[in-house]
Structures are given as C-alpha cells and as structure tokens.
Image (cartoon, rainbow, N blue to C red):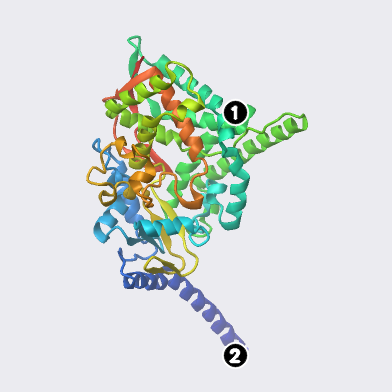
Amino acid sequence: MEASAVLCVLGVAAILGLYIWRISNWLWFKPKKIEKFLRDEGLKGSSYTFVFGDLKEMVQMRRDAKSKPMNLTHDIAPRVLPFIHKSISTYGKSCFTWMGTKPLVHISEPTMIREILANYYQFQKPRGGNPLTKLLAKGLIDAEADQWIKHRKIINPAFHVEKLKHMVPAFYVSCSEMIDKWGKLVTIESSGEVDVWPHLQTFTSDVISRTAFGSSFEEGRKIFEFQREQAELIIKAAQSVYIPGSRFLPTKDNKRMKEIEREVKASIKRIIDKRVVAMKAGETINDDLLGQETTGNMLVWTMILLGQHTDWQTRAREEVLHVFGDKRPDIDGLSHLKVINMIFNEVLRLYPPAVMLRRLIHEDTKLGKLTLPAGTLIQVNTLFMHHDKDMWGEDVNEFKPERFSEGVSKVTKGHAMYLPFGGGPRICIGQNFAMLEAKMALAMILQGFSFELSPSYSHAPHTIITLQPQFGAYLTLHKL
C-alpha cells in the first residue's frame, strides 16, 4: 500500500514536473533561445521580457501618442506606430521585437518583401493568438493556401470590369445623398464647417450595402455599423497577452463581442433567406457583390490633403470640369482623370489604409540571407516603407502627386516599395472597386464644393484596423 502511494505521488510529481517544464519552456527558455538565434543571424532587437515581451511598452507608447494631436505634418509614423518607430530608430530597419512570447521580425528589404508576398503558402497570415480576432477577420482576407485559392476564384468574377460598370449608379446615388446632406449643413452664406469623416464612412458603407445587399440595403448598413464597433473591441483585445480560455469569461467586452457576432449572423441569414425566396420567384441577383470597404480612409485623407494643398484641389477640379462639366460622372470619363490618379497614389503613399502586413512562418525558413525559426512572425511596415528617404528621396514627407506623373511602376522601378493594397497574388481583390468608387465621389465633391482645413481640425492619424483621423476631419466647405 505504501509502495503504491509512493508510486502515485511520484507519478503526480512527474506529470506536474512535465507541465512546469512545458510552461517554463513556452514562457522563457524557448523565446530566449530564439532571441540568441536571431542575434546570431545578425539581427538586432529588443531583449525578451517574461510573458509580455514588448506588449506593455507598445500599448503605453500608443496610449501616450493618442493622448494629443500632432503638428500638421505628413511625417506620421512616430504617432501612428510609436513603438515600432523607436525600435527601428534604435536597431535599424530590419530588426526584431516581441509580441508576447513570439518574435516579430521587421523586414524592409524590397527583394525580401517581394518574396514574402509571392510565397503565400510559406508566409501565411498569423494563426493562433487571441481567437476573438476571428469574430472580425473571416472570409477571403483570412483564408489561407488552398482555401484562399478556392475563395478567390469564387469572388473574382464579381470584380470584373463589366460588373464594376453596373455599380456606378449605386456609387452615384450614395454620393448624391452625402452631398445633399453637406449642402444642408452649410450656412446661408454658402459656406460652413463640416466633419466629413462620419459622412464618408456612411457613404462607403452605403455603397457596399447597395452593391452587396441590394434590396436589403438597410440590413447591410446595420451590419457595417456592428463591424465598426467590433473592430474597436478586437483591437483592444489584441493588445494584451491572451490567456487560454479567457474568451469564455463573462466580461463586458467579451459579452458585447459575442452579441455583435450573433446579430451579424442573424442579419446575414435574413438576407440569404430573402434572396432564396427571390431566386425561387425568378428574380435575378447577378450583379450583387459582397465586399469590404477601405475607400472611406482614402477619401478622408484626400480631402484633408486637398484642404491643405488647395493648388492641387484646383488642378483636380479643373480636370473634372474639363471631362464632365456639371454632368453626372460616368465610368469612361473617370478612367481619364489623370491628375486625380496622381493625387490618390500620393495620398495612399503618405496615408496607406493598412499600415503593416504581418505573416507567420510554420517551419524554419530561408529569407534572403536570413534563416528564421518556425513560429516567427514577420512584419512588413508599409507606413515606414512609404516614408523611407532612401527609397523616395529627401522630400518623402511632402505631398507631391507629381512624383506619380508617369505611373506607379516608373517611380518604384519595379521594387516592392509601394503597397497600399498589399502585393503579390494576395493583392487586395477590391482595389479596382475602391478606386472607381473614390474617383466618382471625389469628382462629384469637386463639382459641388471647394474646401479648406477648418481651424477646428486636429491632425491625429491613428489605427483602428485601418488608418483614420482620430478627432475627425473638420473642413470648411464652400458651395460652388
């Protein structure tokens, strides 16, 4: 009996010892081993800190940066990504930091970036981490490997040029509604201050609601409102170390995220049920599209920049009036707006919707001259690359659309240094949709208004998934 008890105790101790070793390895020994490996590869970076890595400092620096606006300059990286800015300034453009227990290697070499973007089997979207993020990022953007190829083939026809032509009326209707609202907000002297940011968000949501959900337009609008709230909650969750099982705790944020997920699923089910009935009745729904919006970000920064650089606003308006006069913009005319193309390209360089691209490697991988261990996160800092003096010149932080006068490929010389919509096979499938929608909106705005930055405007770029103006976009509008 005593011998059995001893064996039992020894067995429990062995199991306990095994678990202690595994936890210790996960939280300390493995990260420290990887840190040494990365330093031996010639990379510099921060020292691993138990459990949190650099998360605490990252969150605190971000909180401090967001506590007040910045000067009106396009050198925005120190405010938008303060910790990464500090790390790159300290350790160099290619370095490593820590996302909890995982190393995060920052890659800046264009040839390496091209390799990362081209090999989507080898360099995949991060898995694991906080499972709550999956409440938002489901679909094509989150699919991988064979699943991604299958989904892309299904969705691709919806973004064909012929399909996009049929969406122009939806763009026009949504933009007309927004411009009518602005007209009512300005004073009797035909000018007034308007925060255009919420209006542009509503406009882009309405466009997708109309093109994606057809007669279920109001239901679609509701879904996008839920998704915006979900994005803020998920960003908050992603900035902390995830403790396995904590998503099941009945916290206020957890309950709200799950409530939103239920509401969105119920709304989509109602739309699908409605469409099934319509199809059985013989109604056609061939021109519907389910998509994701980034256009609002591009438009708001374009209006802010044109409100600051009114000479370019005048040039853009002259082009629009030359092509359309006061008539309704059409798809053929929109393709001839060269000045507006240049402006959008420069806006997307200075204020890219996605400020970074992150990937995860699942096995030891050779990247350029580096060998990276399995489990390493890789980050391409799009914002920093777009503001790199070595790539763009000393005037990198100046608004100069003329740098794109001969197109993107001419200025980049074929290098992977300009990635507003990502790159490689996984380049944003909605790129043409976003550009067409933005051209239509900007053309109509320029036909109806001139504008400049209001004294109330506070320059404060920050990210909630995409790059946004934290304190709105207050402009003084003048009716034309």
Vertical arrangement, residue 394 with respect to residue 218, above or below: below
Give the mark toward the camera: 2 or 1: 1
Of 271 and 345, nearer the camera is: 345
* x and y, in percent, of residue 231 in the image: 47, 42
User: Label 2 is placed on what type of residue?
Assistant: Ala
Q: Secondary structure at mark 2?
A: helix
Query: Residue 380 vs residue 251: left or right?
Result: left
Q: Secondary structure at mark 1?
A: helix
* x and y, in percent, of residue 430 in the image: 51, 40
Vertical arrangement, residue 1 with respect to residue 300, above or below: below
- Look at 53% across and 35% down and name the residue there: 224
- Residue placed farthest to the bottom in the image? 3
Query: Residue 216 vs residue 206: left or right?
Result: right
Of 430 and 242, nearer the camera is: 430
Are the residues tagged 2 and 1 within 8 Å (C-beta)?
Answer: no
- Residue 222 image-quadrant placement: top right
- Look at 38% across and 65% down and name the residue there: 368
Of 295 and 264, nearer the camera is: 295
The residues tagged by marks 2 and 1 sit, at their Cα atoms, a distance apart of: 74 Å
* x and y, in percent, of residue 241 in the image: 43, 57
Disc assigned to residue 310: none
Residue beneath disc 2: 3
- Residue 404 image-quadrant placement: top left
Of callouts 2 and 1, the N-terminal one: 2
Mark 2 surroundings within 10 Å by alpha-carbon count, few (fewer than 14), some (14 through 19), many (20 or more): few
How many numbered discs sit on the rendered protein? 2
* x and y, in percent, of residue 56 in the image: 34, 55
User: Label 1 is placed on what type of residue?
Assistant: Phe
Specify the quadrant that holds the N terminus.
bottom right
Q: Is residue 241 visible?
A: no
- Look at 43% across and 22% down and name the residue there: 444
Residue beneath disc 1: 217
